[in-house]
Amino acid sequence: MDLDYVSSYSKDVKCYVRGNSKGVWIETQVLPIVKCYELKNVLDSWFYSIE
């Protein structure tokens, strides 16, 4: 996963990459729901869920 690519869509929010045996995901400090859906649209198949 290219975190720089993902981060370019939310420069004002710090992103962290986390992972376990089930996969890899991105966590943020605080990300407005509108930004979550923007990332979902941009990342397409890389995106799994908003929690």
Image (spheres, rainbow, N blue to C red):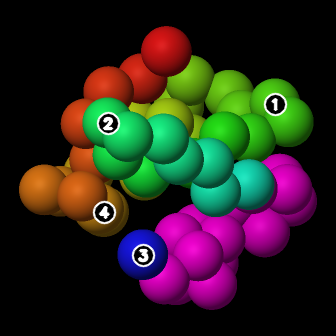
| Disc sitting over residue 1 in the figure | 3
State which quarter of the image contains the N terminus.
Answer: bottom left
Please tell me which residue is depicted at 63% across the width and 84% down the height of the picture: 4
Please tell me which residue is depicted at 53% across the width and 70% down the height of the picture: 6
Local crowd at mark 1 within 10 Å, few (<14), some, or many (≥20)? few
Secondary structure of residue under mark 2: loop
Q: Is residue 38 left or right of residue 47?
A: right
Which region is colored magenta? Answer: 2-15
Precedes in sequence: disc 2 or disc 1:
2
Q: Which amino acid, by three-letter code, is at mark 3?
A: Met
Q: CA distance from mark 4 to mark 3?
A: 14 Å
Q: CA distance from mark 1 to mark 4?
A: 19 Å
Q: Quadrant of residue 44?
A: bottom left
Secondary structure of residue under mark 1: loop
For disc 4, the marked residue is: 42
* Residue 17 in magenta stretch: no
Please tell me which residue is depicted at 49% across the width and 15% down the height of the picture: 51
Precedes in sequence: disc 4 or disc 3:
3
Q: Which amino acid, by three-letter code, is at mark 1?
A: Val
Precedes in sequence: disc 1 or disc 3:
3
* Identity of the residue furthest to the left in this view: 45
| Disc sitting over residue 30 in the figure | 1
Task: Please provide percent x and percent y for residue 12.
Answer: 86, 59
